[in-house]
Amino acid sequence: MMQKFKDKDMQVIIGWVLRAGVFISMIVVFIGGVIYLYRHGHSVPNYHDFKGVPAFVQSASGVIHGVFALRGRAIIQMGIILLIATPIIRVAFSAVGFIIEKDRLYTAITFVVLLIILISAFSGYAG
């Protein structure tokens, strides 16, 4: 006999998703930091010239190419992106849980929240 899916089961899954997301992003940032310090740790900073953020970490394709090229800054940026994506994935898992529970009201509310988050993230407007 199949056991019924309960709210507590969904809370456990969401808890694991949040822990895994934070842990994975922490590991990725740490690896990127080690690579960055290995390559640039001996450099003396020049505070007279402001260089800003390199162009390769300002776009998704640049970050992905930088990760495959094992560039420390790009790997750190990927870890930060993973950390930001963790709560978004949590909202998506909540939506799945509400669909399984057949709760239409909370499913609709969750999808509206997810849509607002995604529009804000990709448009650059926060309100």
Image (cartoon, grey):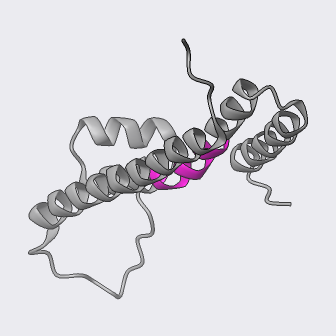
Image height of 64 relative to 84, above or below? above
The image quadrant of residue 69 is: top left
Q: Nearer the viewer, residue 71 or 90?
A: 90
Residue 84 within the segment the image draws in magenta:
yes
Who's the residue at 70% across and 25% down the image? 100
Q: Residue 13 location, x and y as percent?
A: 50, 41
Instruction: Name the quarter where the N terminus is drawn.
Output: top right
Q: Nearer the viewer, residue 57 or 4?
A: 4
Q: Nearer the viewer, residue 12 or 36?
A: 12
In the rendered image, the residue lying farthest to the top is: 1
Task: Provide the residue span drawn in magenta.
Answer: 81-91
| Residue 90 left/right relative to 125 | left
| Residue 2 left/right relative to 66 | right
Who's the residue at 67% across and 40% down the image? 94
Image height of 2 relative to 14, above or below? above
Q: Residue 10 location, x and y as percent?
A: 59, 40
Who's the residue at 74% across and 48% down the image? 117
Q: Residue 8 location, x and y as percent?
A: 59, 45
| Residue 24 left/right relative to 61 | left
| Magenta highlight: main SS | helix
Residue 85 within the segment the image draws in magenta:
yes
Instruction: Name the quarter where the C terminus is drawn.
Output: bottom right
Q: Nearer the viewer, residue 36 or 95?
A: 95
